[in-house]
Image: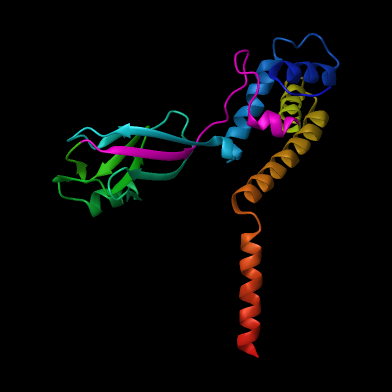
Amino acid sequence: MAIATYTDLQTSIANFLARDDLTAQIPDFIALAEATMSRELETRSQEKRVIANTVSGNEYLALPTDLREVREIKLNTAPLTVLRYYSPVALDEQYASEGGGKPKGYSIVGDEMKLRPVPDATYQVEIIYIGSIEALSATNLTNTILSRSPDAYLYGALAEAYAYLLDETRASQYMARFDKALAQIKVDNQRAHYGTGSLQISSIYQRQSQAAGN
């Protein structure tokens, strides 16, 4: 059967397991596979953007709760101000003065972003980041990963199911299929971002090098 929705996925998992006593656990198997995908994947559907405003005199700003990796942080000023990342110690060393100003650097401290110089006014901060996969549920029946790669969801959930059943052989078999599906998603995502541009540039560089050598 086609796996197009959360309901379809649950039915397919039950069919593969050939059991009717794990209905209550199947959503957990899916959620566990989803957690792994959120940690390992950086797909376009996980790229998110949020806008927040600083408070004058407050150097801390809350980060998105599902943030896994920062892509870019900038102030929407004229012109735009892209903030540079520093470790917490390096940020304090670079901006040791307690004076305020327009932030130029940031660091991550727990669930917050630390800005320096300390904002002297309200600035609009744009955060572009990699977040978690949009979780499937009874009210969210599909997402980009399920639409494009239903096999990843299926194999990941089955690996978790057989681990739950203490069937190490089948758990390993489906985990291998899950890992392969994740690897293919990563390649597909890389192509979508970069195409074959790097290969073309490499070829041009090689021809130039050969010409220079002749």
Q: 67 or 52: which is nearer to us?
A: 52
Is residue 56 magenta-colored? no
Total labels drawn: 0
Residue closest to the far left: 99
Residue depicted at 84% across the width and 17% down the height: 15
Residue depicted at 65% across the width and 76% down the height: 206
Q: Which residues are magenta?
A: 122-150
In the picture, measured across the screen, residue 67 lies left or right of residue 158, that is left
* Residue 120, image x, y percentages: 17, 40
What colour scheme has been applied to the protein in the rendered image? Answer: rainbow
Location of the N terminus by quadrant is top right
Residue closest to the far front: 78
Can residue 145 be seen at all in this image of the molecule?
A: yes
Residue depicted at 75% across the width and 12% down the height: 22
Location of the C terminus by quadrant is bottom right
Image quarter of residue 135: top right
Residue 187 versus residue 163 in the image, above or below = below
Residue 171 versus residue 25 in the image, above or below = below
In the picture, measured across the screen, residue 58 lies left or right of residue 179, that is left
* Residue 141, image x, y percentages: 65, 18
* Residue 117, image x, y percentages: 21, 46
Q: 102 or 29: which is nearer to us?
A: 102
Can residue 62 be seen at all in this image of the molecule?
A: no
In the picture, measured across the screen, residue 108 lies left or right of residue 166, that is left
Residue depicted at 62% across the width and 32% down the height: 36
Residue closest to the far bottom: 214
Image quarter of residue 183: top right
